[in-house]
Amino acid sequence: MTFGEKMTKTILLQLVEPGQTPNPHTNPPGIVVGIDLGTTHSVLAAVLEGKPRVLEIEGEGPLVPSTLKASTTGLKVGETQGDILSSTKRLMGRGPEDPICSQFPHLVAGQGVRLKLADYGLTPVEVASHILSHLREKAEKFFELPVEAAVITVPAYFDEAARIATKQASALAGIKVLRLINEPTAAALAYGLEKGIGGVYAVYDFGGGTFDLSLLKLEGGVFQVLGTGGDLNLGGDDIDHALADFLKTKDIRRARFLKEKLTDHDSFDGVIREDLEAIVTPFITKTLRITDEVLRNAELTPRDVEGVVLVGGMTRMPMVRREVEAFFKKTPLSDIDPDQAVALGAALSAHGLQYGSDILLLDVTPLSLGLETMGGLVEKIIPRNTPLPALASQEFTTYQDGQGGMVIHVVQGEREFVQDCRSLARFELKGLPSLPAGAARVRVDFAVDAEGLLTVSAFEKTTGLFQHVEVHPTYGLDQKALSEMILESQKHGKEDILKRLQVEEGRKENVQPPSDR
Amino acid sequence: MFDPFEILGLPRSFFLDMKVLEKRYFEEQKKVHPDRFALEESAEKARALRSSTHLNQAYLLLKDPLQRAGYLLKAASIHPLSHDPETLTKVMDWNERLEEGDNVSQELAKEEDFLFNELEDAFKSNEYEKANIALYRITYVKKLLKDVYAKAKGRGAI
Amino acid sequence: MAPVLTLTESAALRVKALLENRGKPSVGIRIGIRSKGCSGLSYTLEFADETGPYDEVIEAHGIKVLIDPKAIMFLIGSEMDFTDDKLSSGFVFKNPNEKGKCGCGESFHV
């Protein structure tokens, strides 16, 4: 039996243990879709007659540019000419101090991360929600049915803040997220179910904004992630910028155009492929260094890898294929379109979650989660590549007599010092009992769910003092602003309210204090 | 009490076939993983999350021979060794040589193998005190190996 | 009078296999109905560890099928089938009392 048959089957009534009959769904089933919300373009897919398919409607191809343009009738998604916002996925969950911001001329100084487009002031979350709304409408036009829910993909290496920002964008677009899944896992799912591959596979995902390398074991319907690594600032966009620098131009779109042309031309418009390859070489070297490290951490060698799956637009470049092949000494697989594999996998996952399936995804934490301790050092609580869902605890004590509170600073990253890691949340456990230094016992629990979302709770053992914090991104919308926006958008028509909010919110500061909630 | 062997339905033993462990782990996750309850009420989901988390913890513990040994010793009420002069002398010696720039990694790897065999033998003959000492020593050797690797990485040799 | 419920050959074979694989002895299987689901009512199909005092007991192809007394009037004349093809897999009730069904076949109304 192949994976494909099992996954796409509708599961009817099953014989189960006494009392274990699952609840039937209570609403008529709408449609479920998979969405690859990409840096340069987004792809919508759904399972049709048992097969995952990328959806196309009249006047729009399979790949929808992840762009936003202002027009007299409002904001338009998918335009490629004129004054457009593009690649804003790279800003998801980022703060204004992030170096990546220098790549965005639309960014308004002193307003958090907010982009100015005509009269609109938009956060990256809002831009993403426009793109998602557009895809939802596209699906509804295709099926003439409402979208019930979706699986949305994110880079495996996306941190907590970026994942939450993605969920917020979905909520704002009126899409129920069945689950976020990692892009390489989605691609593996598409290959596993459609092509029936099995064993240990590497997914080399080199896209417009990010690079991810994931190792997965495919066995008996289980997709177990063995390890993952990547770089959020390593994508085709960076190559466009490097090429533009080389050509001494500020026209990034022209650089991208030349890069794409040189994929199947040895020279174009006076630029030769060798020039491009010289620019690309250090980027590829970086991806292979990450690949080597992920293999090493999983205690595997390229020889243990059954095959390599290529995903992302950058893998169209002949040089990338050549280098990956040389590294693994295997011809990489690309029989599924590298621009579509992720969306197809997301569609399969959505279908499985909605209608039941025999397939199981076991993912891991891409980055270590920890706490700040004395001297600005990081104590890792959940190391990277821990299988999800995960739970870990650590006990801390006071360092002063009668210390009444303890600041709990949650960070994410691999480095030793807090300043080099990503700050996720900071809260204070107040009202500790008056005890000599070292006598109070504070237990901090980290719980990460199957999607990779973290909850932290702190607990003082002698008094039973308890605090529970869901980690919210330091940059993004805070929970209150988000729920207000959603409430509003439900009260009024979604479309006009979104437009109104963009104008109103555009003038307000958006950066939130790092959660004293 | 948290019993990883019981959670995975495996006989309580140091000797564990990794293939069997994985098979049991996958089978159990297929039953309890939160994705199986994507459409259920939140109570079901919370329960699934808990069971699935425990299963992961049990799997990770059993997969690692040192953690597995540690668990079995703890379950047999053997207290972890806190002091062993012989080990400490050896470790200090290695540390010195490491600082002087000696390449001790092969020697350490050999020692690790030797100690691991000791650990296995001790469990085979149910000599828990002996296992406890071997476990203590391996922990040190492992840490040293990590330092060696970190140093080599710092030099750019890896 | 028509029997409350009949089993097709394939349903019986499947149930037998599942009973054997269950790993503990069973009295048979129990069929019930509850008022949940998008079309109002839905079937339950579970292994039975014991016979309830008011259960309707039928024997089909050597399998003991217990029917929840509350379900009898909704089930009379039904046939339980098992399908396993490319598109779907599971047990299906062909119930003459059903007036409508939801798209997924999980629930129905009478």
Image (cartoon, coloured by chain):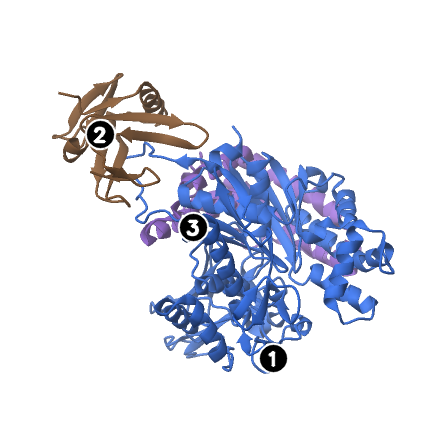
Q: Is residue A138 above or below residue A241?
A: above
Query: Which chain can be seen in blue?
Result: A
- Residue A265: x and y in percent read 82, 51
| Residue under pointer 2 | C96
Give the position of the C terminus of chain C as an image quadrant.
top left
Colour of chain B in the image? purple
Residue A124 horizontal side relative to residue A301, left or right:
left
Picture layout, residue A235 above or below residue C68: below
Of residues A290 and A397, which is closer to you in this image?
A: A290
Q: From where the camera sits, is residue B122 visible?
A: yes
Q: Which chain is brown?
A: C
Q: Residue at x 73, y 53 (%)?
A: A289
* Residue C39 location (% of width, % of height): 26, 43
- Quadrant assignment, res A468: bottom left
Q: Nearer the viewer, mark 2 or mark 1?
A: 2
Disc 2 residue type (three-letter): Pro
- Amino acid type at mark 1: Val
Secondary structure beneath label 3? loop
